[in-house]
Image (tube, rainbow, N blue to C red):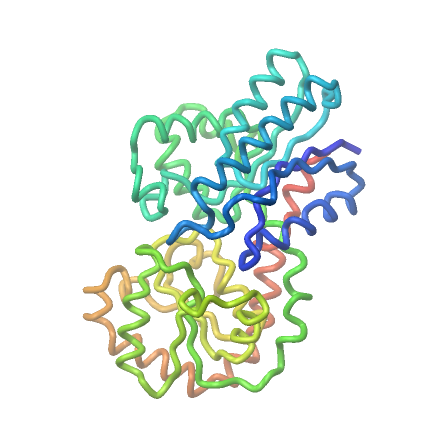
Amino acid sequence: MAKVFLVDLEAVETRYTAQWKQHVPLLLEEHGHEVVIIEGPSDIPSATTPGAFLNFGGTNIYKASQVEQMGRLFTEGRIKSGDHFIFTDAWHPGIINLKYMSELLGIKITIHALWHAGSYDPQDFLGRLIGDAAWVRHAEQSFFYAIDHNYFATDFHIELFVNNLLGDDVSVKSNFADGAIIRSGWPMEYMPSMFEDYRGRVKKDIILFPHRIAPEKQVDIFKHLAQELPQYEWIVCQEEHLTKEQYHNLLAQAKIVFSANLQETLGISMYEGLLADAIALVPDRLSYSEMYISMWKYPSAWTEDFDSYLHNKELLKAKIVSMMTNYDVYRQHTQGQARALHDNFFSATKLLENVI
């Protein structure tokens, strides 16, 4: 089997990246691969930049260290033709360094990378803060073309990426044929077992906002609903500064996890809610449209912006009250939807099939 060099993400204890530190290497080893982990230093700033997943300065310290390690692996002769590199985040400048060394040294490797987001998504922080500046768009295109297999968790994300970044590129169709663009679930096979002890608990009249506090997540809608429906307890999780265990305990008590997101290329928190027997209430847009059956969705128009919400708030309130009142009916279907999500979006089957 192939030797795999895993270029990982820095771990944030409150996010899935902490679990990926252990799970992804084990998953690859279970499939017969020799795994070499390329990770950065552990002493980078741990706090995330507000509204983002990572610390913008710290993540570059981490990635720069990984680039140095890749250079040393080449100079020491430890990388051979036929080896594979997996970047758990495709937004990594080291992909260009890796391609540079591979091409100039004549060592043919295969590069795999998982796309989470980028400037091509106008609702992502890169899209909001940097937009379509030439440097960032050309950088992302360069990453894409340097990567042999680009992985996306949903068809929605692929369409967003192709339309906004690749545009009229005549080679786009061939990218699907030669495996440059692949839809694969993320390596989260461990998640159902994580929530086994959190199912079956007594539920309270709690509604959670489990997302980052960022403009594209529309927390203002959630807070307005809290004023409109004070008979329920409404909690913005990030404001509580919860540990992972505290967050899971809260999911186990909640009846609804709520989304009005304008940006979502997968949506892990909704899946976590279902695993803990909470109702996932999501708009019929973004990745949610292909992931969830109709019973969990409300019309997209209800929360396309705050004004749309105000116009439709009575309909949304009625939906929430009905779900809370009939929670036991919905609970019968949470695990079936969770299993479907696991099989199609939260297990890395297609990725594993390509590492040969």
Residue 299 location, quadrant: bottom left
Looking at the rendered image, the quarter that the N terminus falls into is top right
Q: Is residue 299 above or below residue 197?
A: above
Q: Determine whether, in the image, residue 165 is placed left or right of residue 267.
A: left
Query: From where the camera sits, is residue 281 visible?
Result: no
Q: Is residue 326 above or below residue 301?
A: below
Query: From where the camera sits, is residue 196 visible?
Result: yes
Observer-nearest of 6 and 163: 6
At a point 77% along the width and 44% down the height, the residue shown is 29
* Image coordinates for residue 340, horizontal then vertical, percent: 59, 62
Observer-nearest of 273 and 13: 13
Observer-nearest of 80 and 11: 11
* Residue farthest toward the front in the current orientation of the protein: 43
Looking at the rendered image, the quarter that the C terminus falls into is top right
Q: Determine whether, in the image, residue 48 is placed left or right of residue 3.
A: left
* Image coordinates for residue 94, horizontal then vertical, percent: 54, 28
Observer-nearest of 77 and 113: 77
Q: Is residue 99 above or below residue 92?
A: above
* Image coordinates for residue 39, horizontal then vertical, percent: 63, 38
At a point 56% along the width and 77% down the height, the residue shown is 252
Q: How many marks?
A: 0
* Image coordinates for residue 301, horizontal then vertical, percent: 27, 63
Q: Is residue 96 above or below residue 92?
A: above
At a point 42% along the width and 81% down the height, the residue shown is 323
